[in-house]
Image: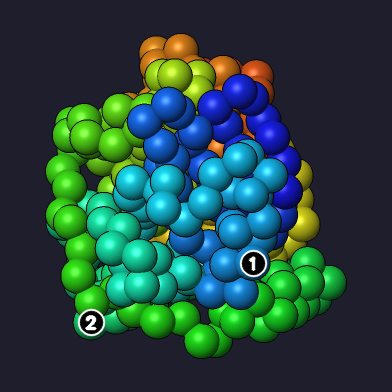
Amino acid sequence: MMRLGPSLHRIGSDIVAVYLVDTAEGVTVIDAGLAGQWRELTAELEAMGRSLVDIRGVVLTHGDTDHIGFAERLRRDHGVPIHVHEADAARARGEVASKPEWGHMKVGPTARFLWYALRNSGLRTTPLTEVVAVRDGDVLDLPGAPRVIGMPGHSPGSIAIHVPIADAVFVGDALTTRHVLTGALGPQPAPFTDDPAEALASLRRLEGLGATWVLPGHGTPWNRGVDEAVREVSEAAAASGS
């Protein structure tokens, strides 16, 4: 668990991360990680002087299973609306599955990723029953006024979420700063991507945002600015031939 700024918290780890935006109006949760990270969510809320009743909504960067972990529990048991891009709604509901290439991997980092997922109930993900569909350009009526930026590539409905009050853009798997299959560090293309070329092209949509924090679903929080992150991902892609 980690406090990144006055309005910005992270739970989870560099393997699978979830973010909380804390404002006077309540809390917005970005992604819902793995089901077993529920206990970290409640512990972090308590440390913030908050509780589950303060969560006004969850925004998913996409519909993959390692990002929707405790979302349905929040929706079903606590009435929290779950927002996801309309193109990933069926994915979040478990109606369609992704079939990405795994690509290059190393035994150690891959084993750590799989073990972390198993320990946090990664095989017991409950698909969503209901979602609130969002589109590119939407500004959501949630704490921090998160703005949706369409980032197709990793999945058809991948988005980034810009929250100016937190000086942050949450990028899900549009990029990573720690490759879960190789252990490589620094901004780079994320694995398990449906269309790597499209994902790389979508990164240009982040340029000029001015956000200091770039916060991926997997990897160390990045605080050297969004333009530098995009530049390094593009360099890493070119170097790997992807």
Q: Using the numbered discs, state the Cα–Cα distance from disc 1 to disc 2 in whole angstroms.
A: 27 Å
Between 114 and 139, the residue placed more toward the observer is: 139
Q: Earlier in the sequence, mark 1 or mark 2?
A: 1
Which mark's residue is nearer the viewer, 1 or 2?
1
The residue drawn where x is 22% and y is 35% is 141
Between 50 and 203, the residue placed more toward the observer is: 50
The answer to whether residue 58 is seen in the rendering is yes
Q: Label 2 neighbourhood size at 10 Å, few (<14), some (14-19), many (20+)?
A: few
Amino acid on which disc 2 is placed: Glu
The residue drawn where x is 22% and y is 36% is 140
Counting from the top left corner in percent of width and height, residue 36 is at: 61, 74
Instruction: Kindly identify which numbered label has been placed on residue 39.
Output: 1
Secondary structure under the numbered disc 1 in the rendered image: helix
Secondary structure under the numbered disc 2 in the rendered image: loop
Counting from the top left corner in percent of width and height, residue 176 is at: 59, 46
51 sits to left or right of 206: right
Between 104 and 124, the residue placed more toward the observer is: 124
Q: Which residue is mark 2?
A: 95
